[in-house]
Image (cartoon, helix red, strand yellow):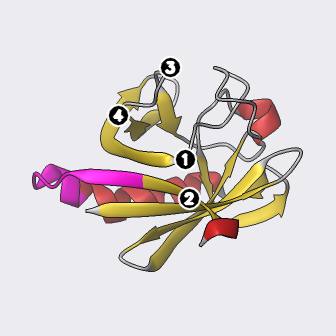
Amino acid sequence: MELQLIRSYHDRGVNGVLLFGGEEICLTIELPWQGNRPRVSCIPEGKYPLRKWYTPRFGSHFEVVGVPGRKYILFHGANDAGRELRGCIAPVLKHTGEGKGSFSRAALDRMKERLYPLLDNGHKLYLTIKNADHE
C-alpha cells in the first residue's frame, strides 16, 4: 500500500500534499532541500517503508525507514519547519507559508486514524516522495 507525498520546493521550506489511494489525507511541511544533510534538509525523493513509532517527546506517530545517510526521520506534529523540524516531516491541515502550516496535531490524528488500522492488520505501507513539477 502506497502513500504519495507530492512536494513543492521553496527557498524557506517544502510544502506537500499527502495522498493515499488518490485521496488527500493532509498537507505537509518540511525543511528546504539542502543536499540531504542531517538535521538541516528534507530527505531525498524516493520510496520508503513507513511504520508506527512512539517517542516520549512526540507520542504516537510514524517513522520513515531506510533513508540513505539518515535515521529517525519522523512524521510528527509541527507548524514551522524551520523552528520545529530537524529533517522530519510534519502533517498540517493548512499551509500558511513556505515550510509553515497550522493544525498539525489534527493532521497527525487524521493520519493515524487512517493508517494505524492498516499497519495493525499487517499491511505494509510505503511512502513515495515526488516533485510536483515532475508529475
Residue 51 percent coordinates (x, y): 30, 41
Q: Which three-letter amino acid code belongs to the residue tagged 1? A: Glu
Mark 4 surroundings: few (<14), some (14-19) or many (≥20) residues within 10 A: some
Q: Do the residues labelled 1 and 4 touch (CB within 8 Å)?
A: no
Residue 34 percent coordinates (x, y): 75, 31
Q: Which three-letter amino acid code belongs to the residue tagged 3? A: Gly
The alpha-carbon separation of the residues under discs 2 and 3 comes to 19 Å
Q: Residue at x 20, y 59 (%)?
A: 118
Q: Name the residue under label 4.
A: 53
Instruction: Reply above or below: 39 against 105.
Output: above
Q: Name the residue under label 2.
A: 130
Could you tell me which quadrant the C terminus lies in? bottom right
Left/right placement of residue 66 relative to residue 95 reads left
Q: Nearer the viewer, residue 92 or 17?
A: 17
Give SS at disc 1: loop
Total labels: the figure holds 4
Left/right placement of residue 4 relative to residue 103 reads left
In the rendered structure, find residue 90 and report the number of the disc placed on it: none
Q: Which of marks 4 and 2 is in front?
A: 2
Q: Do the residues labelled 1 and 2 touch (CB within 8 Å)?
A: yes
The alpha-carbon separation of the residues under discs 1 and 4 comes to 21 Å
Q: Mark 1 points at which residue?
A: 45
Q: Which three-letter amino acid code belongs to the residue tagged 4? A: Trp
Q: Mark 3 points at which residue?
A: 69
Give SS at disc 4: strand
Pointer 4 or 2: first along the chain: 4
